[in-house]
Each structure stands twice: as C-alpha cells, then as structure tokens.
Amino acid sequence: MIIDINSLRELLSSVVGVVQLILEALSVLCVLIGLVRLFILVFKRTRYAQIRNQFGHYLALALEFQLAADILLTTVDPDFDTLMKLAVIALIRTFLNYFLSKELESDDKKKSETQPG
C-alpha cells in the first residue's frame, strides 16, 4: 500500500478546516452566551463591575478559541505571508487576553477582599 503524500495533505487540510470552523463557532457561541448572560444580569440590576467581569470571562474564552483557530490555519498553509499575519493576530489577541485576564483577576481580588469571610 503506497501512501500518496498529496492525498494526506488534502485530508489534513480538510480536517483542519473542519476543526478551525468548530473553534470559530465556539468563539462566537462564547460571545453569544456572554451577551445573554449580560442581559440577564442587567435585567436583575446586577452591579456594573460584576456584569463586566462576567462578560470579560466569556470574551477571554472566545479569544482563546480564535487564537487556536488561527494557529490551525498555519499548519496547512505555512507560507511567510500567513505566518506574518498569524504573528500579528496572535500578538494582538495575546495582549488583549493578557490585559483582560489581569483586569479580571484584579476585579476578582477586589471582590474577594470586600466579601465577609
């Protein structure tokens, strides 16, 4: 049995395309769930800081899924242009996620300090 490398590449490309689509759909789903939760919290007249914190967690998760999808894209098309685009996108998303995570940690820390224990 001879394995055709082009057939394997096409198969890998197809699998990566499906997984990439799933990751992007999960990212959109995270944002949608976050929005629904946001509206529920607004309806319950929850504090702004708590609403922001909850939505921030969903956004951070969505960014993780988007970054994973972008990384997968480069596995099947690793030309220089694609790699440079990924580097820029990854850098931006990583910075966004880092600062969002720091802000959420700060909010969580403030919340735990103000709660009676």
Image (cartoon, rainbow, N blue to C red):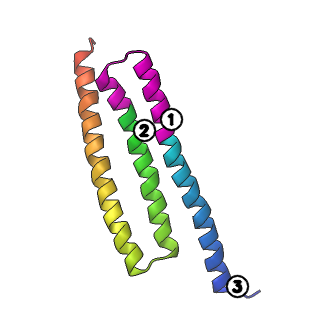
x and y, in percent, of residue 54 in the image: 38, 30
Answer yes or no: do the residues labelled 1 and 2 have beta carbons within 8 Å?
A: yes
Amino acid type, mark 1: Ile
Which residue is pictured at 32% across the width and 48% down the height? 97
Q: Gap in Å between the C-alphas at discs 2 and 3?
A: 43 Å
Q: Label 1 neighbourhood size at 10 Å, few (<14), some (14-19), many (20+)?
A: some
Q: Secondary structure at mark 3?
A: loop
Q: Which residues are magenta?
A: 31-54
Amino acid type, mark 2: Tyr
Q: Label 3 neighbourhood size at 10 Å, few (<14), some (14-19), many (20+)?
A: few
Quadrant where the image shows the C terminus: top left
Amino acid type, mark 3: Ile
Q: Quadrant of residue 101?
A: top left
According to the picture, the residue beneath numbered tag 2 turns out to be 58
**How many numbered marks have been drawn onto this rendered protein structure?**
3
x and y, in percent, of residue 110 in the image: 22, 25
According to the picture, the residue beneath numbered tag 1 turns out to be 33
x and y, in percent, of residue 19 in the image: 58, 59
Which residue is pictured at 53% across the width and 42% down the height? 29
Which residue is pictured at 73% across the width and 88% down the height? 2
Q: Main secondary structure of the magenta part?
A: helix
Pointer 2 or 3: first along the chain: 3
According to the picture, the residue beneath numbered tag 3 turns out to be 3
Pointer 3 or 1: first along the chain: 3
Nearer to me, 115 or 84: 84
Q: Is residue 37 magenta?
A: yes
